[in-house]
Image (spheres, rainbow, N blue to C red):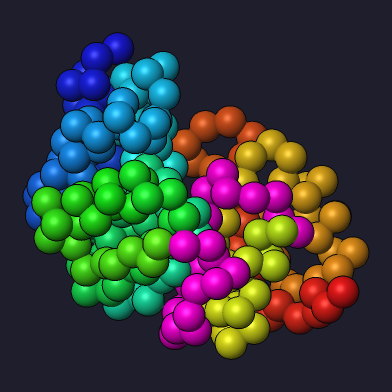
């Protein structure tokens, strides 16, 4: 399948406003021009970018108010951070990324699409304190470590929205050895056996 066919299939299956689609197109076009030089996404993944990666990220919108303040951990190629910012223009997304080339791409995509977003370049654990309603992550770290990274925001009331793969139950069990929290696991609508893992009321974690 070509990327054009993939985009058409995505649009046939999902209702996206013209304004959001325009921003998403600018993000994906920027990704196309950066993806090889910055090792952002593999060539096998590229033909399915819309139905696999864009849609995987967009399903988080069910849980994000229009004006949500989001911190996205390990943003990399911008999934879900850039996609959330494209679809929630009244909110704001702060993306965390330690790799310089990936940070440069994220800033280029923000500029190209006119997104309400910014990028912190550095390790997550060194990030300055900031206000957030939600913390997101996709393919960043196993849940026990992910909660370590997310805890500065979550202990101040932010909700975790994590896209997790088929090992999510095993990760959940491991995380409960150090953390106390409420959770909800919603089957992913983008295929596979993954979930959208919603984590609230985080407590504990001390060594």
Camera-side residue: 143 or 106?
106
Spot occupied by residue 185 in the image (x, y as percentages of width and height):
65, 55
User: What residue do we see at 64% from left, 50% from top?
Assistant: 141
Residue 65 seen in the current view: no
Task: Decide: is 5 above or below 55.
Answer: above
Residue 166 placement (x, y as % from top left): 69, 37
Span colored in magenta: 122-144
Nearer the observer, 108 or 156: 108
Residue 120: x %, y % from top left: 38, 66
* Horizontal relation, residue 20 to residue 59: left or right: left
Farthest top residue in view: 1
In this view, 30 is above or below 104:
above
- For the residue pair 189 and 146, the one nearer the viewer reads as 146
Q: Residue at x 90, y 64 (%)?
A: 177
Q: Nearer the viewer, residue 59 or 39?
A: 39
Residue 192 makes an appearance in the image: yes
Q: Is residue 196 above or below residue 161?
A: above
For residue 202, what is the image quadrant? bottom right
Which residue is at 33% across, 58% downward? 84
Please state the horizontal and vertical placement of residue 67, each as a whole percent of the image. Answer: 30, 77
- The question of residue 85 being in magenta is answered with no
């Amino acid at each position: 399948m070509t990327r054009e066919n993939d985009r058409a299939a995505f649009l046939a299956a999902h209702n996206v406003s013209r304004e959001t689609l325009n921003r998403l197109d600018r993000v994906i076009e920027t990704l196309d021009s950066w993806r090889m030089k910055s090792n952002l996404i593999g060539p096998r993944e590229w033909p399915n970018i819309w139905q696999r990666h864009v849609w995987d990220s967009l399903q988080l919108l069910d849980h994000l108010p229009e004006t949500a303040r989001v911190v996205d951990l390990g943003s990399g190629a911008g999934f879900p951070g850039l996609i959330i910012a494209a679809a929630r223009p009244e909110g704001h997304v702060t993306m965390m990324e330690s790799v310089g080339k990936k940070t440069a791409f994220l800033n280029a995509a923000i500029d190209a699409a006119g997104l309400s977003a910014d990028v912190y370049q550095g390790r997550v654990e060194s990030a300055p304190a900031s206000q957030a309603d939600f913390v997101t992550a996709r393919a960043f770290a196993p849940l026990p470590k992910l909660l370590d990274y997310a805890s500065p925001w979550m202990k101040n009331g932010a909700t975790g929205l994590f896209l997790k793969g088929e090992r999510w139950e095993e990760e959940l069990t491991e995380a409960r050895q150090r953390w106390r929290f409420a959770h909800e696991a919603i089957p992913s609508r983008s295929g596979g056996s993954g979930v959208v893992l919603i984590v609230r009321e985080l407590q504990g974690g001390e060594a």
